[in-house]
Amino acid sequence: MRIRATTPTERLLYFNTFTGNGGKTIYTINGARILTSGYMADNGILYIIDRVMYPFGSEKTVTEYDNNPDVPYLSFTSVTALQEINTPLFQEGADPGNFFTVFSPNDSYTYPISREAQQKFYTNWTLINDTIKAHIVKDKVLCLPAEGNIPEAMSLNGQLKFTRRDGKVYVENNRVRAEVIIPNIPLRNGVLHVIDNLLYFIYDTIHQKLSQLYESRTFLAITDTIPDFTSRLRSETSEMTIFVPETSAFAKVPSRLQGEVEGNITLLMSLLNSHVILGQVLDIDTLLRLENITTLGNRTIRVMKMNNGVYLQHNGLRTRVTRGDIGCTNGVVHLINDVMIDSHLTVWENIESQTQLSTVFDLMRNHVDIRTTLSAEDGSYVTVFLPGTFFLNELPGYSREMLSAGGSRVHEALIGHIVENAFMGSSDFEDGVERKMTTKSGRNIHITRRGHAFFVNIGCIRCEPGSQPAHTTCQPPDTLKGKSLPFLVQGSFRLGQIMNRWISCLHMTTIWPNWELSCKKNGSDFPLPHITGLYQALFAQIAKLQRMVMRIFTRT
């Protein structure tokens, strides 16, 4: 919807609606979210929005702004120099009666394109025309919100898809993705978004593309040690689909397996071939339709969509596609968050390899029975819920001291995180159905799945496996390279109401101890059974507040 503002200048305001988290409708004006319903006044109506509407609008049309942008450091000559290729289209963009959404790459991002790619582009007028059209949506003004789902839009050449990652918005056309650097510049006849890449035009080989991606540097360093595999990645004639583990994925591979593969060209080549489908260019939509695919290494992989993500599964290993459909001249790249090693690892080996579980691993290694249970290769299964190092480091000092001291209470707490004779992945829990499981310590836990969220309840503690604070990294609650399944969990806090009293309740798992704590009451000790370290911290703060109040009254 378009409304012309009457003050301070004759400029247009553009309203859009989007779907946010939980299906809630989001209303925006020039990309700014409207936070409240209108406040009526005698002389008008007031809306509160979530940010200043900047960049400020311009009275220029789309074509005029491309030729002469108001923001000093913007320049689109790489686009405007091509106006003669499709003069009628640029003339339409200069007409205030036509409305457009335009994604324009700034010159600073298009100049680094290789000389070979430029030669290929500028000598093909059909390719130029198709590429220009791929950046333009006609008869629609789409301002991008700071949150919520952005629906796909049809450009004059191809579908535009939008994704969010790490707080950034990306737009994609023909398997070429660009980051939206400056969104929502409102113009007289539409809106312009500044992007950092040329959409539609594919000009890098797989090897060139991987060298540009930070997430794939470890994978590329490994492949460069094998000339035959490298030449395949550089080839302009051999097409392929390749699943590339991110750098963080290699840190999860247990040191034993790293040692076996290192220096063994045969094993390394077999491992790499297990990530390649030769002779086919398969985007995510095609992979989901096929459901099952066979790699060059003769590995059968199942492709599934689950919890708003795409997963690959083979032989007990499930890995998530973190970024798909990276178009290249000789195929397509999909980034994944695990190395697909065809080896049976125990849950103990997985825990040992996870840096975010280093603290709990140090606690568990001192207990032979726990190590035996988690290292078993006799066909038995376990499902394990473990607190991450981040949360354990946030425990009060006296709680950490109790953990470090070890003993029977720590042992009981640790086995309270292990469920024997159970292999439960996230897809094995029905949405909205509570599942009761009994741990090795005899304690019952209750697990409920709601959409993509999982809740573990034990007593008054509520936890969510597989989620974590924004600044930490955590493995999703799914199978990890073997027959056993650890749920990695981290800590954050949520208010929960227990026994009609508001207290801080764990959003993630604590150590689930059965410790008795001592608190002072009228100068004597009294036990408080079944209180976790979180409640220790709560009572410590209350006691501190009481002492402060007493000092104030003493002084007065």
Image: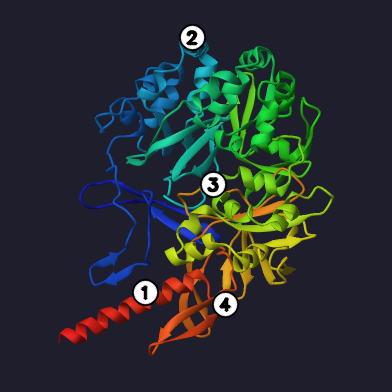
Q: What residue type is labelled 4?
A: His
> Which residue position is annotated with label 4?
530
Residue 347, label in figure: none
The reply, left or right, for residue 555 in relation to residue 471 is: left
Contact between marks 4 and 2 (CB within 8 A): the answer is no
Q: Is mark 4 on a helix, strand or loop?
A: loop
Disc nearer the start of the sequence (4/1): 4
Are there few (<14), some (14-19), or many (20+) residues within 10 Å of tag 2? few
Disc nearer the start of the sequence (3/4): 3
Disc nearer the start of the sequence (2/3): 2
Q: Is mark 1 on a helix, strand or loop?
A: helix
Q: How far apart are marks 3 and 4 (CA)?
A: 49 Å
Residue 151, label in figure: 3
Q: How far apart are marks 2 and 1 (CA)?
A: 68 Å
Work out which quarter of the rendered image holds the C terminus and state it. Answer: bottom left
Residue 139 seen in render: no
User: Residue at (30%, 49%) from the top-left corner?
Assistant: 53
> Which residue position is annotated with label 2?
119
Disc nearer the start of the sequence (1/3): 3
Are there few (<14), some (14-19), or many (20+) residues within 10 Å of tag 3? some
Are there few (<14), some (14-19), or many (20+) residues within 10 Å of tag 1? few
Contact between marks 3 and 4 (CB within 8 A): the answer is no
User: Residue at (66%, 20%) from the top-left corner?
Assistant: 263
Q: Which amino acid does label 3 sit on?
A: Pro
- x and y percent of residue 366 in the render? 63, 55
Contact between marks 1 and 3 (CB within 8 A): the answer is no
Relative to residue 83, is residue 417 depicted above or below? below
- Determine which quarter of the picture holds residue 41: bottom left
- x and y percent of residue 287 in the render? 72, 36
- x and y percent of residue 123 in the render? 50, 9
Contact between marks 2 and 1 (CB within 8 A): the answer is no
Q: What residue type is labelled 2?
A: Gln
